[in-house]
Amino acid sequence: MQVLDNGLLVDPHDQHAIADALYKLLSDKQLWSRCRENGLKNIHRFSWPEHCKNYLSRILTLSPRYPAFPGNEDQIKAPIKGRKCIIVIAVDSASKKDLVCIIKNSIEATRKETLSGSTGFVLSTSLTMSEIHSLLISAGMAPTDFVAFICNSGSDLFYPSRAGDSPSTSRVTFALDRTYQSHIEYRWGGEGLRKYLVKWASSIVERRGRTEKQVIFEDAEHSSTCCFAFRVVNPNYLPPLKELQKLMRIQSLRCHALYNHSATRLSVIPIHASRSQALRFDFLTSCVYHI
């Protein structure tokens, strides 16, 4: 529509804007005639043959970019590939004590009902990998009790493994699934998006008389390549999530905004990333059954 200039652009989520645009088109005869003529003049550019031609030309440019699996992927994913069933523990917005309690109870309850050797556990959360590691170690739990970790609200996917000759001398390492990362990074704003978000965060202030106090700050410690985190000092001054998502759409930013930890943290992740998407990707690349 923007190319042909044969109509009015509106927010598809705003029913009042749609109604106003329809009324304007039907009431203004000159506008209606201009839109109709412009549409008829260049409509061939959007015909089915033209669409097929554009689609095929883009497909040809994408084929060399198909991500190749790393040579050690089979070794990294060996623990998850050997399981007959996967139990996903999705937990958030709880204190660290409650979080550990929920995880432990879920694992113990499952192991009583199933064969522990054939069952694998995936932890899905908004925490970072370092936060999860510290939490499990402090609770006396082994990270290798899990076959995978979905972190940062689905923007990172990690697999634990032991590096060393024997269990007593080995240390736990976490391998990032870079194939999944390359999948969700498509048209991700990167540094440009981060700068825009930092500028936006500085505009959200708490006003007391003539003084203004910023309430959202960049949180580099909890950020990653595909997750920009922001610390929220006063959640009462946060804009509603629906308004924030609308702002992202208006600015053509291909990302999701999420409030975590009782709205004390704001996470912005790629539009192709989510916890369910990470789980689906894990399923497709590991060829296991998830329940």
Image: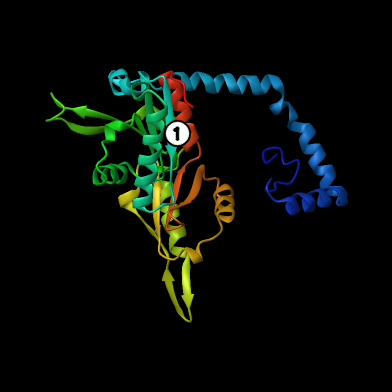
Residue 154 appears left or right of 59: left
Which of the image's four quarters has the N terminus?
A: top right
Residue count near mark 1 (Cα–Cα under 10 Å), binned few <14, some 14–19, many ≥20: many
Give the residue displayed 81% in from the left and 37% down from the top.
37
| 263 relative to 38, above or below | below
- The percent coordinates of residue 179 (x first, y second) are 38, 27
Report the front residue among 162 and 181.
162
Q: Position of residue 36 (x, y in %)?
A: 82, 38
Figure colour scheme: rainbow
On the question of residue 180 being in view, the answer is yes
Residue 273 visible in image: no
Q: Residue furthest front?
A: 112
Q: Residue type at mark 1: give it.
A: Ile
Q: Residue at x 45, y 47 (%)?
A: 268
Closer-to-camera residue (76/91): 91
The structure residue drawn at horizontal position 65% and vertical position 23%, both measured from the top left corner, is: 51
- Residue drawn 74% across the image and 50% down it: 15
Name, please, the residue furthest toward the bottom.
Answer: 209
Secondary structure beneath dot 1 equals: helix
**What residue is disc 1 on?**
184
Exactly how many numbered labels are in the figure?
1
Residue 229 percent across, percent down from the top left = 39, 51
Q: Quadrant of residue 142?
A: top left
Q: Is residue 32 left or right of 161 when viewed as pictured? A: right
The one of 181 and 162 positioned closer to us in this rendering:
162
Vertical order, 246 against 202 (above or below): above
Instruction: State the image coordinates of residue 131 (x, y, percent, origin top left).
Output: 30, 46
